[in-house]
Image (cartoon, helix red, strand yellow):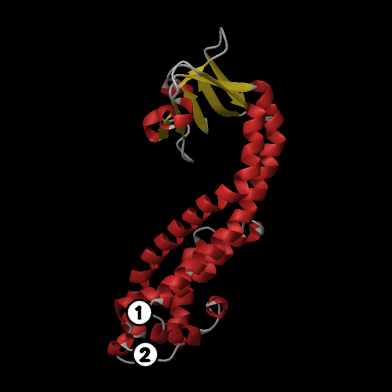
Amino acid sequence: MIKTMIKSFYSPQAYYDVLLAWRWKTVLYFLLLCAVSGGISSVAVIRGFGETLEKEGPNIARQLPEISFRNCEVLMPEGADKIVVKSLSGAPLFAVSGRYLKPNELDNLLFSLEKDRFYAFPAGTQGASADAAQCVKLSDFSELAEADKTYVFKTKEIIDSVLRYSPFFIPIFVLAGSASLNLMFLITMTPACFILSLTLSPNMGFLRAAKFALIAITPVSILSTLSVFIPALNLGVLYAAGTLVLSWYMMKNMPQLPPRFIFFKK
């Protein structure tokens, strides 16, 4: 399958062989593609995340030395209503408060810890109402549920733990994101490849078009992932046009397919 991944860039014969020979192997190939693209991205994310947190960690710990909880609620230092932690550049990162924050207090925050719950704001929704955020209640954590007991967490220790375990949990999220993007692109390209096949390869059919599309999205999946290391490869929407051109070229130059019934043969 690795050879097919490489040949997806230049070999019409490789596309033809996949359409005739692959059945369940198609699913394995999709998983391999997600693993390769997600693995490459994970290296970049782990490195960037680690460097940023190592740089920002002492700054965050100075602004918020510790976080305390009692009865699954945030305990603020005496006289403090909320604490907004900012980056070294002065940009707001997150807020901690013993009350629920108003929408206008959430501007540009990545997340907030409010009274008895944690809000994480997806990219592009910072500053929106809390309804746009992903919410986790502190009562969901059994470690904080013991009544009338105060829990104190040192911010520096939390940062050190995140740095220690980030190489394990970051790939999970990156692989999930990679799978979602590849699946979305596959769903988009399959009808396009089927339409192309009506004139270029009439015996293809929709199922074969889906397999063809899977191989055709391989170059864009790999190149767009490599753009985290090589910015010149970050071509954005041009990748979609390039994939259509690649699909047309491969379909036009590969051998004509036999009738579709052979798809069900071993």
Viewer-proximal residue among 187 and 119: 119
Sequence order check, earlier mark of 1 and 2: 1
Find residue 66 and report its image quarter.
top right
Alpha-carbon neighbours of circle 2 within 10 Å: few (<14), some, or many (≥20)?
some
Residue, x 46% and y 15% (percent of image)?
A: 148
Give the residue at x 67% y 44%. 50
Where in the figure is residue 94, as x and y percent of width and height?
A: 55, 28
The amino acid type of the residue labelled 2 equals: Leu
- Say if 206 sits above or below 186 in the image: below
Give the secondary structure at mark 2.
loop
Is residue 150 shown above or below 179? Answer: above
* Three-letter amino acid code of the residue under disc 1: Arg
Residue 211 image position (x, y, % from top left): 39, 76
Residue 203 at x, y percent in the picture: 31, 87
Q: Is residue 144 visible?
A: yes
In the rendered image, which residue does mark 2 sit on?
A: 257
Report the disc number at residue 110: none
Please name whichever residue, 62 or 215, is drawn nearer the observer in this view of the structure: 62
Q: Is mark 1 on a helix, strand or loop?
A: helix
Q: At 70% across and 43% down in the image, what residue appears?
A: 51
Q: Relative to 35, is 91 on the left or the right? A: right
* Rendered image quadrant of residue 263: bottom left
Disc assigned to residue 208: 1
Residue 96, how many percent across, how many down? 53, 22
**Residues tagged 1 and 2 counted as in contact (Cβ below 8 A):** yes
Relative to 215, residue 108 above or below: above
Mark 1 → mark 2, Cα distance in angstroms: 10 Å
